[in-house]
Amino acid sequence: MGKKNDLESKVEQQVLSTSDLRISGVVSQKGATNLIGQDMSGLRQLVPFMRLVSTTKKQAFSVVDTPSGRTTAKEFPLGKFLVHMDSMLEVYSSRFDFSPELALFFSVLRQHEEMLENITVKNPHILSGVGNRIVADAFNDFIEKLRKGAAAEGTRKKMADRARNSSKNRKRLVKVINVLTERYARLVVVRLDLLYRSASIETGQARAEANQRLLSQQLRDQRNWLTGKAEDKSDNMARIDVGVAKADLNAFLANMRKAPAFEAMVGYAWKMEWSPWSGYHFHLVLFYNGSKVQNDYLIAKNIGERWEAVTGGRGFVNNCQVNKNQYKHIGTGILNHWDEEKRQKVIEAACYLTKAEQYVRVKPSSRHRVFQTSIVKEKGNLGRPRTRASGSLKAGAIFSGVV
């Protein structure tokens, strides 16, 4: 497998392993993260299950009756996913826009009464007796209907189109990182989240109340989905309107060259996301000239003060430089141009922004750009090759704050 596929695989693993944090995580103003509401762990099974369905032709089980009258079954790779069907169902919400293959899964499941009736089976590995045979046959039939539906709806092409957009954004971001790493002897990489105080949860009681509210909403949502009722919009938890959030971001990015917090900045990327409780918020990766600044924590602190100022005190920042050990792929701090291992960590962490919503994202209420990188121009002659002891080059990066 080549580097490109290695990177995509690593980023996908990161996306799936952190899906709970991205969708159900709520950050307090002290930096603590709590999971509330919907359990998204089933996404870690749902994505590989649908990939196997679309790339193989085998059934999940081969069930036969022996001459002695007993039922035996051979389990194929797809069969291992049967025990996870209930957790995969838990991923559903009418508030989400699913990737084509996941949307197909929920569409076919909703119409498959046998599969829905047996979705909580916990021990399908020993398939003996009529009841378990019915479950195995139902699962095989469900998979066959998924394949027919995928062919009829052109699901593989839709999957490729959606992945292509993610890949396009990833290439843009990798280019920014590679060009800046070659241009500067040392970079300082800063990651932070731009959040709103109205969505933060500061006490145990508030966390319990929010969790119950979200779970009740999810149960109503899934009940309506199963019975074909209209989406229930009576409990709209949006804290900040998308237009207000984008206006805040535009104000934050305006006149970047003149703001002290951005004096030594040479590149950036931002991503707008939404979650059921936190609503709209932003993730940032910023790159600074390491010959001028070195303290990533202090940089993040200054940026937080700017975000609070432009939002009139409504916003606060989650500083990812604090408690770095809680992040598996933090990718922040000093990046020397010769440090290929650190560069790959930075790329993996930054590219999370481009793939996080490939499978599940908020349904857009209006057309808004949700991802942007700075613009960097490659230069033909960067001068003599540098060694570890070399100083930084003074060539500046060209970047745009227009969104």
Image: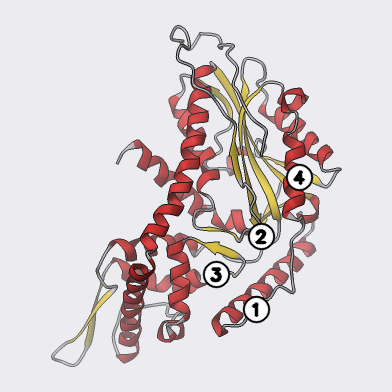
What's the residue type where badge 1 is placed? Arg
What's the residue type where badge 4 is placed? Ala
Q: CA distance from mark 3 to mark 1?
A: 12 Å
Query: Which percent across, then down, holds residue 116?
Result: 46, 82
For label 1, the residue is: 220
Look at discs 4 and 3 and give the one toward the viewer: 4
Neighbour tally class for label 2: few under 14, some 14-19, many 20 plus, Cα within 10 Å: few
Q: CA distance from mark 2 to mark 3?
A: 19 Å
Q: Is residue 205 above or below residue 399?
A: below
Sequence-wise, which precedes: disc 4 or disc 1? 1
Residue reaching furthest to the front: 367
Neighbour tally class for label 4: few under 14, some 14-19, many 20 plus, Cα within 10 Å: some
- Residue that appears at 63% across and 79% down: 230
Q: Which quadrant would residue 39 be assigned to in this image?
A: bottom right
Query: Which percent across, then down, holds residue 125?
Result: 32, 75
For the question of whether residue 105 can be seen, the reply is: yes
Neighbour tally class for label 3: few under 14, some 14-19, many 20 plus, Cα within 10 Å: many
For the question of whether residue 40 can be seen, the reply is: no
For label 2, the residue is: 365
Judged left or right of residue 251, residue 335 is left
- Tag shown at residue 247: 4
What's the residue type where badge 3 is placed? Tyr
Sequence-wise, which precedes: disc 3 or disc 1? 3
For label 3, the residue is: 92
Query: Which percent across, then down, holds residue 353?
Result: 55, 44
Q: Is residue 380 above or below residue 95?
A: above
